[in-house]
Amino acid sequence: MSLEIKLNCPSKKRALIRKKILDWYDANGRHDLPWKGKDIYKIWISEIMLQQTQVQSAVPYYKKFIDQYPDLESLFQASLNDIMKIWSGLGFYRRAENIYKTSIRIQNEFNREFPKSYDEILTLPGIGRTTASAIMTFSGNGHYSILDGNVKRFLSRFFSLEINNSNLNSLWELSQYLLSVNRPSDFIQAYMDIGSLVCKKSNPLCNKCPVKKQCSSYPYKSGSAYKSKKTKITEKNIWSLVIINNKGEFYLEKISYDNLWRGLYSSPVFHNESDLMRWSKSHKIEEFIEYDIFTFSHKLSHITFTFNAILCNIKYHKKVSLSEDNWYNLSDIDFGIPKYQDKIFNQYKSIYDYN
C-alpha cells in the first residue's frame, strides 16, 4: 500500500467507511440474488453472466441455465450449441464459449472439480482479476477485493480520482485496502450494490449514500474531472438474406459478423447489399429474391444496427447451391440464435404464414 493512499485514508477513517458500508448493506443490499451461497460452480456461472450485463437482465438467464445445468457434471454433458441455445438473447456470446472451454479444461486439467486456487482460476478462459477475486471471495476461499465498473466509479468519486490507466493500480490498492477482513463477501457485494443503486453513472443518489460525509465529491457534479468516459455508440447498416423454401423452412447458417454472434445461427448476413447479391448469385438463388426490404433497428451496447432484410422465397431446389442440412422448421431449432433473428422470424412467418 502506497504512503499516499495511507495518508488519504488512515486506518481510523477506513474502519468508519467499512462500518457505514456494511450497515447500509445489511439494511439495503441485494440479499435475495439467486446465486447467493458458497457453491463455487454457481458463483462462476453468475460472474461470467454479469460481465457486461446488469443484474436484472442476468437473473432469468441464470435461473434457466442452472435449471438445465445445476452442477459441473451436468455441464460436462453439454455441447457448445447447447450452451449457445440457452444463452441466446443475453449477448456477448464469447462468454458462453468461455464457459464451454472452461468445462473442457476442468475435465482435462482439474480432475473434474472447479479449482479453488486464485492463480488457477485466473488461467481459465474469460476470467480476469475481478472475476477471479469475486469467485474466490464469494465462495469463501479467499479475501480478495474487486474493481468492476461500479466499484471504479464509487472509488474514483469517493477519493476524487480520475478513471484512467495511470490511476488503475491506485484504485485496486484502495479497493483492497478498504475490504473488510471479517465480512469480505458481504463487503464486495455492498461495493457493487452501492455503485449500482446509489452511486449511479448518471443522477447518483448522493443523499442516500452511507459515506457521503467522507466522500471527496459530495455532492457529485456530472461535469467533474474524474467522470468516466461515455461509451461511443456506432451506427451501422447490415443486410440479411431471409431464405425460405416451399415447405416453410428457413435456411440458417453459423455466423460470425465482425466477431459478433459467433457460434450462433441466423439467416446469412452481409456488410452491404452488393455482398448479399454476389453471395445469392454464387448460390444460384438470385432469381427467387423479392425486393421488398424489411427494415428494423437492433441495438447492442456499443452499436446500433439498421437491418435490411430481403426475402428469398425458393419455389424449388433444382440447381440451388445450398446445403440440405441447413433448412429448419421453427419448431426444430435446438441451437442458439441472436435476438435479431427472432424479429426476422416474426416478420416473415406472419406475412407468409410459415410455421
Image (cartoon, grey):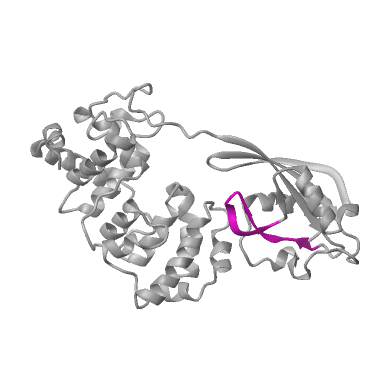
Give the image location of residue 67, x and y in percent: 48, 67
The vertical placement of 41 against 266, above or below, is below
* Image-quadrant location for residue 114: bottom left
The vertical placement of 231 against 78, above or below, is above
Q: Count all numbered tags in the image, as a single digit.
A: 0
Give the image location of residue 7, x and y in percent: 11, 33
Left or right of 14, for residue 303: right
Q: Is residue 290 visible?
A: yes
The range drawn in magenta is 249-266
Q: Nearer the viewer, residue 330 or 309?
A: 309
Identity of the residue drawn at 12% across and 41% down: 15
Which is the main secondary structure of the residues drawn in magenta?
A: strand
* Image-quadrant location for residue 327: bottom right
Magenta stretch encompasses residue 83: no
The vertical placement of 155 against 247, above or below, is above
The vertical placement of 14 against 222, above or below, is below
The quadrant of the image that shows the N terminus is: top left
Identity of the residue drawn at 69% across and 44% down: 271
Q: Is residue 70 visible?
A: no
Left or right of 120, for residue 231: right
Magenta stretch encompasses residue 259: yes
The quadrant of the image that shows the C terminus is: bottom right
Q: In the current view of this chain or complex, which residue is farthest to the bottom? A: 111
Left or right of 328, for residue 173: left
Identity of the residue drawn at 29% across and 55% down: 133
Identity of the residue drawn at 35% across and 62% down: 123
